[in-house]
Image (cartoon, grey):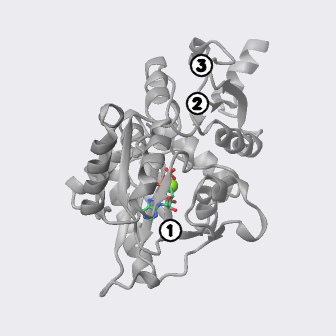
C-alpha cells in the first residue's frame, strides 16, 4: 500500500524535488569570490523545488564529500570562478561522472578562461579586440635585464602606452596591472607571473567605458539589456570589485546610458561572441567602449574584452542584475539555468 502511494505520487510528478549540488570554493585566486557568489545562490534556490546540498572545495583542492558521490544528484551548479572551477576542469570531471551541470561545457569554459585563446578566436572571426602580445614565463625568467628591455621596447612599439598586463587565466582583476610607462613593466609582469605561466599584454582602450551583457541559452541565445560599470578608480581592479565602499565604490548603471542602436549592436555582438566561444548555458560578455575623452576621430572604438562563463553571482552582481532588469528575477534565473543544464 505504501509503495503504491509512493509510486502514484511519483507518476503524478508532484513530489520529488530535484537534488541539486552547489559546488563552491575552489583552488583559484577567486576562492573568496566564490564564497560570496555561492552564499547568494544557496539562499535564493527555491526550497520547494530543490533539495540543495552545498559541496565545498578548499583552497588545497580537498572536497567536503567523496567526488563519486556527486553521481547521485540530478544537477550540479558550479559556482566557482577562475582556474580549476570555471576553466573546463570541473566541467570535464562532471561530464565523466555523468551529472548534468549548469553553465558552459568543457570547450566553452576553457576558451572563456584563457584570455589569449579567447582573443585569438575572436580575431579569427573578425570580431573587434584590442591589440595584444603574449609573454611566457620561461622566456621572461631566462632573459637578462637587457633582454627584458628589448621585450619592453617591443611592447611599446607594438601597443604604445599605457598597456594592461594580465595573467592569461584568471579573473576578478587578480594579478592585473596598468602600466603607463615602460619602467612599470617588470613589476607588472612579475606580478602576473605569480598567477600564470602565460601573460597577456594589451593596448589600453583610452577612457574606456565598461559595458556588459548577460547571455542565457543552449542553442537559442537570449541577451539581457546592456549594463555599465563605473569603477571610480584607475581601473576596475580587485579592490574596486569587492573591497572599496563609499565614494570610491563602483557604480552599476542598468541599463547603460547609451543610444538604442549601440545597445542593439552590443547585444547582437554578445550573442555572436558566446556562440563563437561555445559559451552555452550562461555567460557574461564584457566590452570596452572608447570614452568621449579619447579624442579619436570618427565613431568610438568598441572592443570585446572578455567573457565570464561563471560570472559573479551575488544578488548585487552584474549578471543577475542585468537579467532582473530584463524581466527575469534572481530565483527565476536560477530555475532557468537548472532547466538549461537538464535540457542538455
Ligand atoms: N585593454 C584595456 N583597456 C582599458 N581597460 C582595461 C583593458 N583591459 C582591462 N582593463 C581594465 O581592467 C579590468 C580587468 O580586466 P579584465 O580583462 O576584465 O580581467 P578580469 O578577468 O580579471 O575581470 C577591466 O574591467 C578594465 O577596468
Ligand atoms: Mg573583467
Residue hosting label 1:
210
Mark closer to the observer (3, 1) = 1
Pick out the residue farthest to the front.
146
Residue 270 placement: quadrant:
bottom left
In front: 341, or 150? Answer: 150
Residue hosting label 3:
70
Residue 68 placement: quadrant:
top right
- Local SS, label 1: strand
Q: Does the residue labelled 1 lie within 8 Å of ligand 1?
A: yes
Q: Do the residues labelled 3 and 2 touch (CB within 8 Å)?
A: yes
Q: In the rendering, which numbered label is found on residue 76?
A: 2
- Local SS, label 2: strand
Residue 169 seen from this side: yes
In front: 17, or 112? Answer: 112
Q: Position of residue 292 (x, y in %)?
A: 45, 84
Q: Position of residue 215 (x, y in %)?
A: 47, 56
In front: 193, or 34? Answer: 193
Amino acid at each position: 500500500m505504501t509503495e503504491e502511494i509512493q509510486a502514484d505520487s511519483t507518476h503524478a510528478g508532484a513530489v520529488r524535488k530535484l537534488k541539486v549540488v552547489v559546488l563552491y570554493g575552489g583552488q583559484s585566486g577567486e576562492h573568496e569570490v566564490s564564497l560570496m557568489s555561492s552564499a547568494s545562490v544557496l539562499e535564493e534556490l527555491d526550497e520547494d523545488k530543490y533539495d540543495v546540498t552545498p559541496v565545498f572545495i578548499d583552497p588545497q583542492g580537498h572536497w567536503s564529500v567523496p567526488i563519486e558521490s556527486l553521481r547521485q544528484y540530478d544537477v550540479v551548479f558550479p559556482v566557482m570562478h577562475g582556474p580549476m572551477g570555471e576553466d573546463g576542469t570541473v566541467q570535464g570531471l562532471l561530464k565523466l561522472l555523468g551529472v548534468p551541470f549548469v553553465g558552459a561545457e568543457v570547450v566553452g569554459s576553457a576558451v572563456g578562461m584563457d584570455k589569449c585563446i579567447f582573443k585569438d578566436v575572436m580575431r579569427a572571426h573578425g570580431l573587434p579586440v584590442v591589440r595584444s602580445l603574449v609573454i611566457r614565463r620561461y622566456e621572461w625568467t631566462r632573459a637578462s635585464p637587457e633582454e627584458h628591455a628589448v621585450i619592453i621596447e617591443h611592447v611599446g612599439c607594438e601597443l604604445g602606452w599605457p598597456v594592461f598586463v594580465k595573467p592569461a587565466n584568471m579573473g576578478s582583476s587578480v594579478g592585473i596591472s596598468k602600466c603607463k610607462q615602460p619602467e612599470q613593466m617588470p613589476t607588472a609582469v612579475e606580478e602576473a607571473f605569480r598567477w600564470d605561466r602565460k601573460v597577456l599584454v594589451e593596448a589600453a582602450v583610452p577612457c574606456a567605458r565598461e559595458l556588459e551583457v548577460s547571455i542565457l541559452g543552449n542553442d537559442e541565445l537570449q541577451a539581457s539589456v546592456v549594463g555599465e560599470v563605473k569603477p571610480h578608480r584607475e581601473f576596475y581592479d580587485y579592490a574596486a570589485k569587492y573591497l572599496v565602499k563609499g565614494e570610491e565604490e563602483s557604480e552599476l548603471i542598468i541599463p547603460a546610458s547609451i543610444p538604442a542602436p549601440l545597445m542593439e549592436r552590443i547585444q547582437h555582438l554578445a550573442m555572436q561572441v558566446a556562440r563563437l566561444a561555445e559559451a552555452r548555458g550562461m555567460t557574461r560578455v564584457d566590452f570596452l567602449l572608447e570614452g568621449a575623452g579619447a579624442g579619436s576621430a570618427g565613431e568610438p572604438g568598441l572592443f570585446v574584452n572578455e567573457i565570464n562563463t561563471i560570472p559573479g553571482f551575488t544578488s548585487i552582481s552584474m549578471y543577475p542584475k542585468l537579467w532582473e532588469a530584463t524581466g527575469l528575477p534572481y530565483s527565476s534565473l536560477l530555475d532557468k539555468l537548472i532547466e538549461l543544464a537538464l535540457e542538455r
